[in-house]
Amino acid sequence: MTPDSPIAAHRGRLSMLAAAWVVARRDFTAILFSRTFFFFLLGPLFPVIVGVLAGSVGNRVAESGAGPSIAVVMQEGDARAMVQARDALADRLGEGLPRLAVAADEASATRGGAGAVLSGSPAAPVLSGPSAQIEGWSGDVAMIAAQAREDSLRSWPRVRLEPKGDARPTDRRSRLKTAQGAQTLLFLLTMMLAGMVLSNLVEEKGNKIIEVLAAAIPMESVFFGKLFAMLGVSLVGIAVWAAVGAPVLMAASATLPLPEPAVGWPMLVGLGVVYFAMAYLLLGSVFLSIGSLANTVREVQTLSMPVTMMQLMLFFFATYAMTQPGSPVEILAAVLPFSSPFAMLARAAQEPALLPHVAALAWQTLWVFLLVKGGATLFRKRAMKSGPQGGGRPWWRRARA
């Protein structure tokens, strides 16, 4: 190669970061404006549609199969008073009370699938049915009958709430649920999106594009560029999904208020994006090394399976460590690079301190650099070798030979 060749001039002009930016921009643009990216965005839509349809069908089956718990066989006025009293109490006590439905006689109540029959009068109710059921319902029936005799629901005093303390048990339980949900969402997004790195690199190896890039720029630049390009594509996809699902989340939060995390929702969402990026880069760097060494899709699947299983085990470990705040188990989960993003995101939901996140992000960034450096070195030593000693066989078979 002469000093005036394009490759030599290219190496002289671009630093490792500049070359990585060129690769990242090329891959990001090529994927973002392809038809594959459109189908990639539609991917999560099909499980959601199936889940909604399955839920609606399940609710319809449950509604059609569930008969009234207690059939009321009384005089018309007494039966109507019992049902109205039950509904009035349910408005205040919740739907834990047994359901009541008026029946003409005991035979029709049995055909309708009632669990018990309530006869007599509100002054002297008679509950008949299996002993295990009627014993549990006797107290509720007595309260409903007493309310039916009053003809109106008495006014109850309003209870004034005076919460005290910053760390109530209910707060800890709700924050634990928030931490668990954040961890699960982070894991699902990481595992669903990190696999794109494998197919991208295997395809370019088959087209010999990776060899041209490796000859023109440092291999570390190729790895970093591809990692950040796929991360950018993943973030665009997540942004589109979030924009589509935002109205649903807002409606759900209005009807069912979400528990407040320790650092607040804006900070937790910001840390979630950052920790997703770190988890993606950590796992993606390993997948990138595997994809650079494998020659076929089958080899990629064989080599990536142990990594996937290891990541699943580390996720379970981080989930367990979440329940032991401040213990050596949680500290170990935060130190291990592949479980650190999950453990630290759960910590953000339970503890308000922000300084540990700075140290954790610096530690994870160091490991991303080391993994990319090691993958690039392994690729140069194994995949870029030429000559008769390779024999066209995979590198792990050559090692055994």
Image: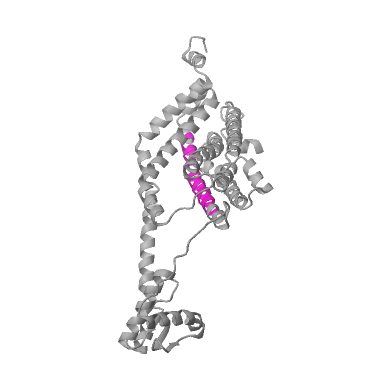
Q: Nearer the viewer, residue 23 or 48?
A: 48
Farthest residue toward the left? 76
Q: Main secondary structure of the magenta part?
A: helix
The residue positioned 35% from the left and 49% from the top of the image is 247
Q: Is residue 39 visible?
A: yes
Where in the figure is residue 303, as x and y percent of width and height?
Answer: 57, 42
Q: Nearer the viewer, residue 147 or 46?
A: 147
The residue positioned 35% from the left and 33% from the top of the image is 33
Where in the figure is residue 177, as x and y percent of width and height?
Answer: 53, 54
Q: Is residue 401 visible?
A: no
In the rendered view, tell whether residue 13 sits above or below residue 220.
above
The residue positioned 50% from the left and 20% from the top of the image is 216
The answer to whether 270 appears left or right of 252 in the picture is right
Quarter of the image where one finds residue 31: top left
The stretch of residues the image draws in magenta is 176-201
The answer to whether 70 appears left or right of 11 in the picture is left
Give the total number of marks visible in the rendering: 0
In the rendered view, tell whether residue 365 sits above or below residue 248.
above
In the rendered view, tell whether residue 48 sits above or below residue 217.
below
Q: Give the colour scheme shown.
A: one colour
Where in the figure is residue 85, as x and y percent of width and height?
Answer: 37, 77
Q: Is residue 183 magenta?
A: yes
Farthest residue toward the right? 328
Q: Nearer the viewer, residue 259 or 24?
A: 259
Quadrant holding the C terminus: top right
